[in-house]
Amino acid sequence: MNFTYEDHSAVTVVRINVPRATADVSKEFKTFLFDLVDNQKHQRILVDFSKVEFADSSFLGSLVSGLKKSTAIKGDIKILSLQQPVRTMFELTRLYKVFEIFDNESDAIKSF
Amino acid sequence: MKFIHLVGDALVSYLKLKIIPDKISEYDELLQSSKLLMYELYSNAVRHSPSKRVEVKVQFTLNFLSIDIETRGPEFIITPKNLADTSYHFPYPESILGSNFVVYHDSEEMVHCHVHSDSCLEFSRHPVQNTNDQDIEVPEHFGLLFLTTICNDVKYFRTKAGLNIFSVKKHFPQEALN
């Protein structure tokens, strides 16, 4: 499974299980997020990037789509564990201003 | 999209052959950004073209890495962000030759599309004046921002035969090249 999720208290932790989060899986990721938000009404989502070595603009676009969908129902999406190349992408697109980013999972879960 | 990793890895392998690591600072970052560049070009080509064939041409010209991506299919349509319900198709009309249009916009930067001719466009990145951090716009499509950030030169050509060519140049210090 490219994407999985588990519930921790009231927070849903989404695990990205691919090392390269790129255009070939971005549509699947967007569908996955939309299903969590739309159909399963998950409001507090933490996306774990710890296994991701590389992300492209298409994948980040899906993440932003998910955030917009989530905030529409007063939810939020936060980010966990960015490796340096992915962190660079967040800086390049200034998404670090839009998403709260954490290095520690328990801190991230408590922050909601 | 199944070849996306292949083309990205192929470019990195080529660069490792061409670049002398000791002669360049931030070697790893340069490989990473070049790979990202290839991903952007390739995924855009595949997503926006019904063509089964995507031709990728990579070469060094003096101290620039040049990448051309060629596809057949619909042309690049100029859709200015600051002009509602307006779009310009190939061949780009004479009335807009020499004009600049904003084709990407967020709270800090925008990308201009300069209309060189009826078949050639050039893209460049510019800061937004009077940035207000409280008012962050969040676009979902970053492709042109990426290309204009990573590259020194980003152009699009459409040939009369219906070929779309995205052509980019990225500077490399000449002393670092084999």
Image: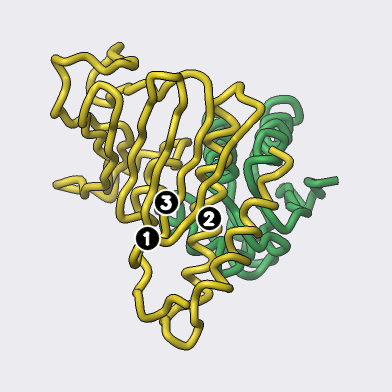
Chain colours: A green, B yellow
Q: CA distance from mark 2 to mark 1?
A: 20 Å
Nearest to the eye among marks 3 and 1: give it: 1
The residue wearing badge 1 is B61
Q: Quick one: B126 or B121, which is closer to the camera? A: B121
The residue wearing badge 2 is B36
Q: Is residue A75 above or below residue B15?
A: above
Secondary element at tag 3: loop
Mark 1 residue crowding within 10 angstroms, few (<14) / some (14–19) / many (20+): few
Q: Position of residue A2 (x, y in %)?
A: 80, 46
Secondary element at tag 1: strand
Type of amino acid at the residue the image marks with label 1: Thr
Q: CA distance from mark 3 to mark 1?
A: 29 Å
Q: Position of residue B103 (x, y in %)?
A: 31, 31
- Residue name at image x 28 percent, y 24 percent: B80
Q: Position of residue B61 (x, y in %)?
A: 37, 60
Type of amino acid at the residue the image marks with label 3: Thr
Q: Is residue A92 above or below residue A37?
A: below
- Residue name at image x 69 percent, y 40 percent: A24
Badges 3 and 1: C-beta atoms under 8 Å apart?
Answer: no
Q: Quick one: A38 or B54, which is closer to the camera? A: B54
The residue wearing badge 3 is A93
Q: Residue furthest top?
A: B85
Looking at the image, is mark 2 or mark 1 earlier in the sequence? 2
Q: Chain of mark 2?
A: B
Residue B120 location, quadrant:
top left
Q: Quick one: A37 or B175, which is closer to the camera? A: B175
Mark 3 residue crowding within 10 angstroms, few (<14) / some (14–19) / many (20+): many
Q: Residue furthest right?
A: A1
